[in-house]
Image (cartoon, rainbow, N blue to C red):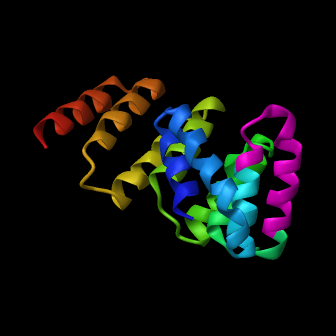
Amino acid sequence: MDYRKLSAMYETRSDVVKSYQYIAKAYELRGKLPEKERLLIEASWLMQKEEDKPRAHEIFHKLVELYPDDFLVRFQHAYTGEFDYEERLKAYDYLLHVKNYKSTPLFVNLTSLYCYLEEYSKARACWEESLLAFPSEKWRRLVLGFLFILEGNLEAARGEFERAARE
């Protein structure tokens, strides 16, 4: 449903007010939708409050059982943070390399997770893969430069920053 997608979009832009407004509208209209979309909306709605997150996780588990091959369901479930880091890495890797699902949020989440785990070379490799998937998005070069800095490779970082400035 478009309201759920709009809510997610505003959430990634840190506009919590609009994100909440759209998920509230989606939640209000959920009864008219097919089961999968209705459950996704309910789980997204429940993720708004810390005390409701266990119920949201139950719904995500149900969704994965009902739709095991649906990459959107797996991505949403991994994104909730219910898993430990290794499980999240497996879920993201499954989406990226088994389902061949390429998206900015997936690359951002996986790269961030590698950085959190201080696995900077894996973070850089993941981000380089995002550059191959979205070569026209020049801002990705800047991020790659910062990842090289985390690895201590200042010369490579400088090269990426210069390349970004030229393109």
Where is the N terminus found, in terms of image quarters? bottom right
Seen from the viewer's position, the closer of residues 25 and 70 is: 25
Q: Main secondary structure of the magenta part?
A: helix
Please tell me in which quadrant of the rendered image residue 163 appears. Answer: top left
Q: Does residue 43 appear to the left or right of 144 in the view shown? A: right
Q: Measuring 31% from the left and 29% from the top, which residue is drawn there? A: 157
Q: Is residue 16 above or below residue 167?
A: above
Seen from the viewer's position, the closer of residues 108 and 162 is: 108
Q: Does residue 64 appear to the left or right of 134 in the view shown? A: right
Q: Which residues are magenta?
A: 45-64
Q: Measuring 80% from the left and 44% from the top, which residue is drawn there? A: 82
Where is the C terminus found, in terms of image quarters? top left
Can residue 39 be seen here?
yes
Query: Is residue 145 highlighted in magenta?
Result: no
Please provide percent x and percent y for residue 109: 57, 44
Q: Measuring 61% from the left and 64% from the top, which residue is drawn there? A: 95
Q: Measuring 57% from the left and 66% from the top, which residue is drawn there? A: 97
Q: Does residue 162 appear to the left or right of 5 in the view shown? A: left
Query: Is residue 59 highlighted in magenta?
Result: yes
Please provide percent x and percent y for residue 60: 79, 58
Q: Does residue 63 appear to the left or right of 107 in the view shown? A: right
